[in-house]
């Protein structure tokens, strides 16, 4: 079963029309959506996301914060444990031909990149 995200999107044209002005977004991604493609790390609670998006120099700059609880496995003893996950993130998205950015899908991608390898 594929996860269906809520329609939380960034309107790229609105950002382009106000260069340098930050737009704030707050939303939640269900833990089941985060767990679809990642067997090593399991989210135990919904992912709370706060972010600001700003258009500068032909790119969208994102700055935000994640909060959830994840279940991890120790790489030494192979025991599972739960840990709070609070992480700041930054990203840059080149603006090409897209008109909107799907925020929950983008948050899932960035979340996976911030997971510890071990």
Image (cartoon, grey):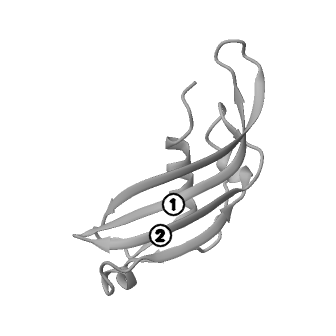
Give the image location of residue 2, x and y in percent. Answer: 67, 54
Which residue is pictured at 61% across the width and 61% down the height? 49
Q: Earlier in the sequence, mark 2 or mark 1?
A: 2
| Pointer 2 residue | 52
Q: Above or below — where is 23 with respect to 37? A: below
| Pointer 1 residue | 64
Residue 102 visible to the viewer: no
Which residue is pictured at 39% across the width and 56% down the height? 91
Q: Would residue 54 appear left or right of 37 to someone viewing this image?
A: left
Give the image location of residue 6, x and y in percent. Answer: 65, 70
Q: Above or below — where is 15 with respect to 113? A: below
Q: Which residue in the rendered view is the most extreme toward the top? A: 77
Give the image location of residue 86, x and y in percent. Answer: 63, 48
Which residue is pictured at 37% across the width and 72% down the height? 54
Quarter of the view holding residue 16: bottom left
Q: Callout 2: few (<14), some (14-19), or many (20+) C-alpha neighbours within 10 Å?
A: some
Q: Secondary structure at mark 1?
A: strand
């Amino acid at each position: 079963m594929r996860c269906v995200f809520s329609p939380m999107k960034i309107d790229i044209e609105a950002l382009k029309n106000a260069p340098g002005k930050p737009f704030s977004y707050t939303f939640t991604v269900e833990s089941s959506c985060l767990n679809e493609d990642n067997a090593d790390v399991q989210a135990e609670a919904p992912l709370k996301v706060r972010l600001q998006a700003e258009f500068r120099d032909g790119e969208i700059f994102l700055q935000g914060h994640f909060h959830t609880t994840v279940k991890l496995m120790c790489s030494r003893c192979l025991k599972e444990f739960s840990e709070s996950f609070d992480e700041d993130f930054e990203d840059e998205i080149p603006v090409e031909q897209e008109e909107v950015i799907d925020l929950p899908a983008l948050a899932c991608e960035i979340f996976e990149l911030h997971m510890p390898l071990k």
